[in-house]
Amino acid sequence: MLIEGLRIANERNEVLKTKILNDINNGDKRPNATIILVGNNPASEVYVNSKIKASSKVGIESNLIRLDSNITDIELENTINALNRDNNVDGILLQLPLPKHLNEKKFINLIDVKKDIDGFTLINQGNLFQGEPCVNAATPQGIINLLEAYNIDVKGLNAVVIGRSQIVGLPIAKMLLDRHATVTVCHSRTKDLSLFTKSADLIIVAVGIPKLLKEDMVKEGVIVIDVGINRVDGKLIGDVDFETVSLKAKFITPVPKGVGPMTINALLENTYKVSKNK
């Protein structure tokens, strides 16, 4: 069965839109998210535009701060600190990747944790791993939302996460563990990937390698979540060989229109969440 991420995201966005409209009618301020975009990375431009468009549809005000690619450390630091102090700004998003001369971890962690809608700060990620309330990174939260929308209970499942990034792999592994799945994390140094994937009930792939997961690497009835977005010959394809793996999968996400829309929805919901917690 195809997991329709776009449809689920649209449904959740409508619910969020209604909540925001009701809040505004009751005298609350419209939620605000400010995006910082450094340089002109084409992929970042597309993603930022999608975030701004989606924000507008649900009633979230979004502001975009464009900064030159050769900006200095102190200039970016001053920009983030000014937004931290601005009571009109509910959420701050620093679009990644940054130019090479800027330390991503440093600037992510300058963001006030109460305004961290990406869920990337040490405090939010530390709270996740301590089992404390936090803002979760948008892609892992979007994946959890998708699984729940299709009534997929991960309790007791053998789950394989391919990829160990701080943005997707590690947080989704922890979120699956919290829901009582048995989790194996594989990565670029894993010696025999298929040894793990062949016995998996649930596979989440987030490595950015086109068609990495193939039909002979999975069992019948597997659940496959494809986080990959790769442009090959002008087409967007995932990390899964969809045409063949889908023949064996019980559930599978497409690329595009799978995890991507759910990521943006989770980001919008994070913005709403931080605006209510101020």
Image: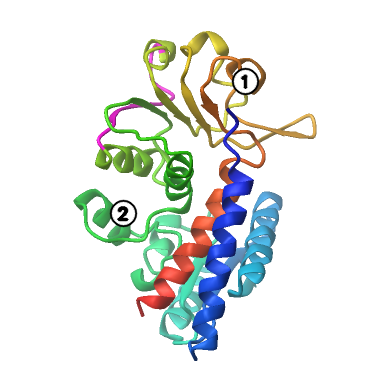
Is residue 128 visible in this depiction of the protein? Answer: yes
Name which residue lies at 43% across and 12% down. Answer: 194
Judge the density around disc 1: few (<14), some (14-19), many (≥20) Cα neighbours within 10 Å: some
Residue that badge 2 annotates: 125
Of the two numbered discs 1 and 2 on the same chain, state the one appearing first in sequence.
2
Q: Nearer the viewer, residue 233 or 52?
A: 52
Query: How many numbered marks does the figure carry?
Result: 2
Outermost residue on the bottom side: it is 27
User: Is residue 207 placed above or below 116 in the rendered structure?
Assistant: above
Magenta: main secondary structure = loop
> How many residues crowd around disc 2 within 10 Å: few (fewer than 14), some, or many (20 or more)?
many
Tell whether position 190 is magenta: yes
Please give the range of residues in magenta: 180-192
Quadrant of the rendering where the N terminus is positioned: top right
Q: Residue at x 22, y 58 (%)?
A: 132
- Could you say which quadrant of the image residue 238 lies in? top right
Residue 85 location in percent, x, y?
41, 85
- Image coords of residue 160 (percent x, y): 38, 25
Q: Amino acid at mark 2?
A: Gln
Work out which residue is located at the far right of the displayed protein and give it: 234
> To which residue does mark 1 refer?
241
Residue 161 at x, y = what percent? Answer: 40, 30
Q: Amino acid at mark 1?
A: Asp
**Label 2 SS:** helix
